[in-house]
Amino acid sequence: MRPLKCVYLFIFILYLSVRQNAAATSKDGTCATVAGVDETCKTLAEGEDDINLDFCVSTLKSDPRSASVDMHGLAVIATRQLLAHASSTESKIEEMMELEMDGKEKDAFGSCLDEYRDALDKLNDALDNLNSKLYDEAIALMEKVFDAGEICEEAFLEVQEGASPVASEDRNYGQLAGVALALAKSVE
């Protein structure tokens, strides 16, 4: 009797092992693999004019999890970084609006604030969709707020010459948005 129980136990363990390997297979039938940040960013930069290779690599590598995730994971990381950046930019704009300034400058800051608030709402929804692997929905939301930084800069062109007080933040937002969107499209 005892050897028969061992055979059943062996078959059961083998069955569980096969099921676990099948569960680790992605929707296209290949095993999900860790995406190398350097190679991924190189591919993205070659395919998109607005993606800076060094910016992409340094941004993704700033999150230690990027070393051990697949393309989906990189898209989630980049979107989280974009969300964090939009949030800090929104806070900076709110602080600057509290300072004494003329009405036109306040209006420009108000336009920027509206753009970044809209971006935060849509990016939170996009992140939820990415986490649920609803890539088309996530991409559509990200595309709607892709140019929030540019719109903010345009609001200041009507008020003053040169760059806005948040030009650096707007530029970084645009670069982060490009990376996050390209990654989301690559796992679609």
Image: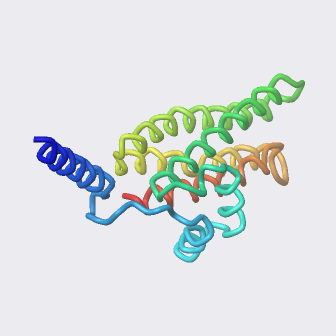
Furthest residue to the right?
100
Is 171 in front, or is 160?
A: 171
Expressed as whole percent of the image width and height from the top left, the position of residue 88 reads 72, 35
Q: For the view shown, which residue lies furthest in the bottom direction? A: 46
> Which residue is at a point 45% across and 35% down the rendered structure image?
125
Q: Which of the two residues, 92 or 128, is positioned nearer the viewer here?
A: 128
Residue 90 sits above or below residue 184 on the image:
above
| Residue at screen point 83% across, 46% down | 160
Image vertical order of residue 87 relative to residue 156, above or below: above
Q: Nearer the viewer, residue 55 or 101?
A: 55
Residue 37 sits in which quadrant? bottom right
Q: What residue lies at 51% left-to-right and 63% top-to-bottom?
A: 35
Between 50 and 19, the one nearer to me in the picture: 19
Coordinates of residue 143 in the picture (x, y in percent): 47, 51
What x and y, as percent, mark residue 146?
A: 55, 51
- The N terminus: image quadrant: top left
Q: Position of residue 180 (x, y in %)?
A: 55, 54
Considering only vertical position in the picture, is 39 above or below 89?
A: below
Q: Left or right: where does residue 48 sit relative to residue 109?
A: left
* Image quarter of the C terminus: bottom left
143 horizontally vs 158: left or right: left
